[in-house]
Image: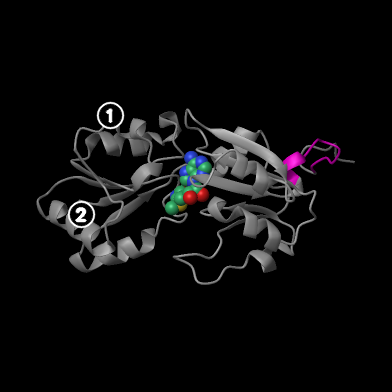
Amino acid sequence: MKIYFVGAGPGDPKLITLRGKELIEDAELIVYAGSLVNPKVLSSAKGKKVDSFGMTLEQTTRLIVDAWKQGLRVVRLHSGDPTIYSAVREQILAIQPYGIDYEIVPGVSSVFASAAALGQQLTSETLVITRPSGKTLAEDQLVELSNLKPTMAIFLGVDKIDTIMQRVRYAPETPTSVVYHASWDDQVIITGTVSDIATKAREAGITKSAIILIGDELTFEGERRSYLYSPKT
Ligand SMILES: C[S@@+](CC[C@H](N)C(=O)[O-])C[C@H]1O[C@@H](n2cnc3c(N)ncnc32)[C@H](O)[C@@H]1O
């Protein structure tokens, strides 16, 4: 029996894959990753649910391995997609010595739910997914990456939005948005520029559970046409 690392999607319970939903419904143990997994996604679960917030890798591994040894069906549930800032690889490595097979079931990352909420596209060229340094990352590359002027999606950083906006090398008028709880019932969208988004986010009281999106792509008004849909001569 496998351990399933499942993407719960961004929040809206309809934004989970059919496979993810099926696995959640069948699971006898679901270890889910804290408050960013919307309780509505778990409402069809019949098995035991354990919030992994505050638990160490050793503790979650023990829980999962013990359940697996008892022949239980186990789902490790992450918000969004499990391959984005969910430390999935270390969890896989931790169960491998027990000879346990695994599968990753993708999910809709909150970066995509945020772009959808804004009604904008993330690329005609390059999207960078990144995060600022902090408790769990010693050094970041925000300055170097922003020099290239991609569309930038910043996870895990809205509490540091003032410093981030001072550090990035975009023009002050570059379109910038903050999306809190994308796809949840209490979703909040804040739009502005590099120069004013920090004040707007602070005034709205957004300090967590949000994505910051920066880049000219975020005001694509159609003056530029894509090659894809242009008449070919
Ligand atoms: C530990 S990471 C998990 C990311 C997740 N694996 C994903 O693909 O969306 C948590 C961060 O993801 C972002 N996040 C997760 N869900 C969100 C949502 N519904 N709306 C906006 N940001 C979200 C926030 O930046 C949050 O601090």
Which numbered tag is attached to residue 64?
A: 2
Ligand 1: does it lie within 8 Å of the C-beta at label 1? no
Classify mark 1: helix, strand or loop. loop
Q: Nearer the viewer, residue 196 or 74?
A: 196
Q: Is residue 28 left or right of residue 90?
A: left
Residue 108 screen position, x and y as percent: 48, 41
Residue 228 screen position, x and y as percent: 76, 41
| Kind of residue at disc 2 | Ile
Q: Is residue 33 left or right of residue 130?
A: left
* 219 magenta-colored: yes
Q: Is residue 74 left or right of residue 130?
A: left
Residue 16 screen position, x and y as percent: 41, 36
Near mark 1 (Cα within 10 A), the count class, few <14, some 14-19 or many ≥20, is few
Question: Which residue occupies 18% across, 65% down?
Answer: 98
Question: Which residue occupies 66% across, 46% down?
Answer: 199
Question: Which residue occupies 68% across, 66% down?
Answer: 143
Eyeballing the image, is 93 above or below 101?
Answer: below
Taken as a whole, is the magenta stretch helix, strand or loop? Answer: loop
| Kind of residue at disc 1 | Ser
Which numbered tag is attached to residue 135?
A: none
Start-end of magenta stretch: 217-226
Question: Which residue occupies 34% across, 46% down?
Answer: 34
- The residue beneath circle 1 is 44
- Determine the CA span between mark 1 and mark 2: 20 Å
